[in-house]
Image (cartoon, rainbow, N blue to C red):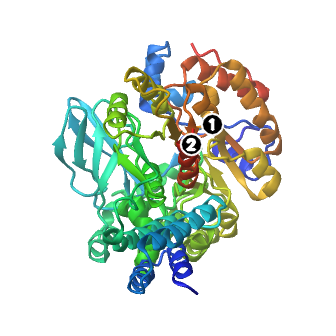
Amino acid sequence: MGYLSVISQAVQNGDHNKVVQTVEESLRDGMPAIDVLEKGLVPGIQALGERFKGGEVFLPEVLISARAMNRGVEVLNPHLTGEETQKQGTVVLGTVEGDLHDIGKNLVKMMLECNRFHVVDMGIDVPPTSFADAAREHKADIVAVSSLLTVTMVNIPGVIDALEKSGLRGKVPVMVGGAPLTREFADSIGAEGFAEDCASAVDEAKRLMTH
Amino acid sequence: MSISDGERFLGICRFERPGDLCLLTSFFNGFWSKTLEEWVQQGAPKQILDSSFCNAYFQFVDIHAMRELKTGSYNDRIDIGGGVTYEHSVHLVVPPYESRIIGEDERTITLINKDGKKARVFKDDPERMPMFLDHPVKDRASWEEHKKRLDPNTPERYPSDWNAYVQEINSKSEPTMLLAGSLFGHLREWVGLENLLYMFYDDPSLIEDMMDQICYLETESLKRALKDIRVSCAMFWEDMAYKTGPLISPDMFRKFMMPRYRKITDVLHSNGIDVIFVDSDGDVNKLIPLWLECGVNGHCPLECAAGNDAVALRKKYGKDIILGGNIDKRELLKGKDAIREEVMSKLPFLLETGGYFPAVDHLVPPDVTFENYCYFINTMREVAGMEKLSFQ
């Protein structure tokens, strides 16, 4: 099995030691770092994402696989050029005002970063204007909002209003997700995107990048 | 001939009372405190802030969860100043940790609670789920310390006057519920969810040790209770699923949890307890057959937003499963037509087939109006052929 297949499988198995060892070997053997990243690590996490969406693996497997990938990326980073480290896009991500839940948001962040998005993590209990300010400051491509309660999901339209007031509406799409949320709710408030889980969030973010 | 509420409860669980609408308290029908406060503003009598009045007002049937026996979570409270109290669950630990406030900003207070967790709580709404910043169990060394609070023989785990307690419980006509603890939920509270999920791979033997200690605590303390106390049913609490599925795989559940579940349910079964519930939020569909396999035959709250469907479960499992909850709280936010449609789509079938305790699929949140909730109650009573309540 070649380096790339071994790396991809090791990511899917969450074997961070194997990932680091094989990434180092591949670099020593002269493989370009960008190839290791794009043809080894990223396919591994993408395959894991598909298996998660298919109900084959669960959250512990997602976490250890993301960790394995990140360890591999740490080895690669000094070998990647500035252009090669360019991200797919920038996502401003946070849990809506009044809500202190973060596990869902953290998983989305992890999967987006593994799929080469730059994530600006605003944390929890984020006021609407903070989303808008961060979107402007970081030149965000997407704003992603999480909510776990029916009593806090009602604060999400405020984020869209804040983007409107700051002149970003129509330029920066909004993606939403969380336990009480549905695509119907997302449509009703004018959000451009909706994700059921952390793996789907990556697909949705990619779709919105071409929006 | 009239029967007691306890007998009625068991009759419904055993599918002997089709059509009987029984709205239970405790793990079934409940409200956020803020909900009842809002309802008083909307015209509800102020007395509904008192739980006994509230239960009688809506004609709930009280089921007594024996939290006085610290065999599961029990409640404790911390004064956070300004006349505000933060009430929270303490997960099995006896004695509880010493609580203290360690920080404050305009909107929140950071404290160590009696469960040993560092929590950030909203000052103006301490009932809202806090953010947990740190947990008492991080590794084997901290586990060994924490374990000292999980001894089934600690006297403070039980009421000091055991005989008086036994007499009090055994004289009740309402159903009684023994809390059987939790194999995942307590670990999550002690370790933190993310750390726990990593730990299944990084230190599985520590997971096994923690679950073994819980299993030991439960089997010993339940045996003690069951020797003297009349028990209608048992309840596990897990909260081990989320919107799209379980937090761990069925294979992990089978490997880590099922052997320990069986030890506890064996104790319950050998003492005549054949109604054993589990309370888990989220999508539990993949786990229900595994719970059934280890003797856990009742399930609540069956959250609708997570894809749980009591009608489908009844059709799939027949009388092997007792069901509770599954009334979509999101429909109660809408108007009467939506509420009626929700009730009519489920209740006639579920009451007719039996083994079902209706409830909103979690605590009723404050954005549900008093008017809507009263309409919901009366629509259910209509289905059951009962007189409507006037809610004066």
The residue labelled by disc 1 is A183
Pointers 2 and 1 in contact (C-beta within 8 Å)? no
Chain letter of the residue carrying label 1? A
Q: Is residue B73 above or below residue A141?
A: below
At x 65%, y 42%, the residue is: B304
At x 71%, y 41%, the residue is: B3
Residue type (three-letter) at the residue carrying disc 2: Thr
Chain letter of the residue carrying label 2? A
Q: Position of residue B253 (x, y in %)?
A: 58, 70
At x 81%, y 42%, the residue is: B18
Residue type (three-letter) at the residue carrying disc 1: Arg
Secondary structure of the residue carrying tag 1 is helix
| Mark-to-mark CA distance, 2 and 1 | 19 Å
Q: Is residue B141 above or below residue B371?
A: below
Is B263 left, or right, of A16 in this rendering?
right
**Residue B123 seen by the camera:** yes
At x 53%, y 82%, the residue is: A6
Q: Position of residue B213 (x, y in %)?
A: 42, 74
